[in-house]
Structure formats: C-alpha cells, structure tokens
C-alpha cells in the first residue's frame, strides 16, 4: 500500500473508532469530576495522539484509545495537584463523588518529585519543563538543542517512570 493510502485508511479507522469510543473516553474523564469542556478537550487530545501514530492495528485500537484516556486522566489530575500545591489556590476541588484530600494530593506530588530526583539531570530538566512549565516538545528542542525525537523519547520515558511509581505508591 502507498503511504497516502495507509494514512487514509488509518484516518477512516480512527474516525470510526471515535464514533464508537468517544462517549466512553468522555466518561473516563467525568468519573474524576473534570469539567465538561475540559473533558471534551481531553477526548480530543486522546484522538490527536492516536492520529500521530504510524502503525495502527485495528483489533487493538479501541483498547489503545481507552489506555491513552486513562493515562491522560492521571496526567491531568497530577498536573492539577501540582498547580494546587504551588499556587495554593482552589483549582483542585472535587465534587462529592470523588473526594481527594490534601494529604493524598501531597502524597501524589511527593512520589512524583521523588521520581524526578532519581532521574538524570537532562531527563529531570525535560520532565520538569514539559510537566510543570507546560513547554511543548518543540519549545524544549529549541531550549536544549536536542532532536525532537530525543526530547519526545525522554518525555515518554520519564512519564512512564513517574506513572509506574505512582501506581505502586497509590495501589492503582
């Protein structure tokens, strides 16, 4: 198959998957009491990430989309916890169905910062830039002089390190 035909096929497959899984992804975010408009944005982020994939296996696409949605939710909640801690404001308020105490927020942040301390200097710097300073991969490339592939690889690897430790620490 030609590259354009593969891309077209992938887009059509992703479009069909979007129609069938969109509401399920949305529910993943709403379960954490995330605002509706933010949920819509996060669902779009999930599918934008999928659109960036080179190889798509049809039988595994739905599971991949759901996994990405759960990871995005964890990232979003960790980010909100950090903003609350740093700025000491009320951005991290959950409704009655999901009560998260300040102690839990601090635990999450402490685990995350503990993992960052174990990273190499470059990995920690790139993680902090993308996570806490909200820099894009392109901005980090300009600031560090690394290739985009190297930056994306470091972001992916360090996020996985943090996620793994959070899962262990928080038992999820």
Image (cartoon, rainbow, N blue to C red):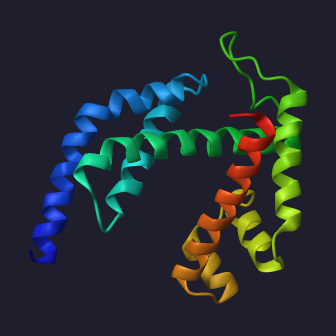
Foreground pick, 57 / 72? 57
Foreground pick, 8 / 67? 67
Residue at image position (89%, 64%) is 117
- Where, quadrant-wise, is the N terminus in this rendering? bottom left
Side (left or right) of 28 relative to 131? left
The percent position of residue 150, horizontal first and vertical second, equals 58, 81
Q: Is residue 97 above or below residue 112?
A: above
- Where, quadrant-wise, is the C terminus in this rendering? top right
Side (left or right) of 106 relative to 12? right
Residue at image position (74%, 74%) is 123
Q: Is residue 122 above or below residue 115?
A: below
Extreme residue in the top direction? 96
Hey, which quadrant is residue 88 in on the image?
top right
Q: Is residue 89 above or below residue 120?
A: above
Q: How many marks?
A: 0
The percent position of residue 86, horizontal first and vertical second, equals 87, 46
Residue at image position (88%, 28%) is 102
The percent position of residue 137, horizontal first and vertical second, equals 57, 71
Hey, which quadrant is residue 85 in on the image?
top right
Foreground pick, 34 / 165? 165
Side (left or right) of 106 relative to 149? right
Extreme residue in the bottom direction? 145
Residue at image position (68%, 17%) is 98
Q: Is residue 102 above or below residue 6?
A: above
């Amino acid at each position: 198959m030609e590259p354009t035909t593969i891309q077209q096929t992938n887009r059509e497959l992703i479009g069909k998957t979007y129609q069938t899984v969109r509401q399920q992804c949305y529910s993943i975010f709403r379960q954490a009491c995330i605002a509706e408009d933010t949920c819509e944005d996060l669902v779009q982020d999930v599918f934008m990430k999928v659109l960036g994939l080179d190889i798509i296996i049809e039988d595994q696409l739905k599971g991949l989309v759901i996994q990405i949605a759960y990871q995005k939710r964890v990232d979003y909640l960790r980010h909100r916890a950090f903003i609350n801690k740093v700025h000491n404001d009320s951005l991290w308020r959950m409704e009655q169905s999901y009560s998260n105490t300040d102690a839990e927020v601090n635990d999450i942040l402490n685990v995350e910062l503990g993992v960052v301390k174990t990273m190499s200097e470059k990995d920690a710097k790139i993680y902090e830039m993308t996570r806490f300073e909200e820099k894009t991969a392109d901005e980090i490339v300009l600031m560090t002089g690394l290739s985009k592939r190297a930056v994306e690889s470091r972001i992916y690897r360090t996020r996985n390190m943090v996620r793994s430790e959070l899962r262990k620490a928080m038992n999820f």
